[in-house]
Image (cartoon, rainbow, N blue to C red):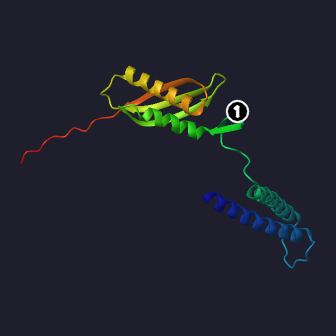
Amino acid sequence: MAKILDRLLLFVYSLSIGILSVIAILLLSGAIPRTLEIKDGPTAYIAAITAAVVLFLLSIRFFYISLRRDRASMPSVDQRTEYGDIQISMETIENLSLKAAGKVKGIRDLKSRIRVSQAGLEIMIRAVVDGEHSLPLLTTEVQRQVHDFVQETTGIPVADVSVYIANLTQSPSFKSRVE
């Protein structure tokens, strides 16, 4: 919704600036008779016409931007099957990897990044752990879960799963109060 509003505002802005700059160019060039006199002479006219032309060119550019369609598609992984093409967005693969890593007990606050290489997908997982489990076992389990789940679900080979342990969650300590 905000993108549509931004484009509408850009359209109105570019249209109004374009009209004002055309009027200014016509007034200053003498195409439309004017009753206003500028005392600085030809330098003021040249500066005013230059400013009006620059504003007009900018308004044409903004007008074009407000009307063109977004052709940039979201990054995706493309596959060809015997039935046709398949495109899986990077966001989908990130969410699949987060879903798989979230199944491992002891893992919190997950973030995922995906890169596509010649060998397959390279998945980077950033996690916070609870500190109650062995880190080598925990990270190995996350790697295995993410690798198997993403590869099985998407059919795209997973070349590498890197796990970065960012921090350790502190379990809240409760002190009993005696009154």
Q: Residue at x 91, y 75 (%)?
A: 32
Q: What percent of the width, then of the height, locates residue 113?
A: 54, 33
Residue farthest to the front, as pictured? 83
Count of numbered labels shown in the rendering: 1
- Say what secondary structure mark 1 lies in: strand
Q: What percent of the width, then of the height, locates residue 155?
A: 60, 30
Q: Which is more toward the observer, 48 or 44?
A: 48
Q: Which is more toward the observer, 78 or 13?
A: 78
Residue farthest to the right, as pictured? 31
Answer left or right for 148 relative to 32.
left
Q: What percent of the width, then of the height, locates residue 15?
A: 77, 66
Q: Which is more toward the observer, 58 or 120?
A: 120
Quadrant of the image containing the N terminus: bottom right
Q: Which is more toward the observer, 39 or 3?
A: 3
Q: Residue at x 38, y 21 (%)?
A: 137
Q: Quadrant of residue 89?
A: top right
Residue farthest to the bottom, as pictured? 35
Q: Residue at x 47, y 37 (%)?
A: 99
Residue under label 1: 81
Residue farthest to the top, as pictured? 136
Q: What percent of the width, then of the height, locates residue 37?
A: 85, 75
Name the residue type under label 1.
Thr
Q: In this picture, is 123 found above or below 24?
A: above
Label 1 environment density (alpha carbons within 10 Å; few <14, some 14–19, many ≥20): few
Answer left or right for 132 relative to 41.
left
Q: Residue at x 51, y 30 (%)?
A: 149
Q: In this picture, is 70 found above or below 51?
A: above
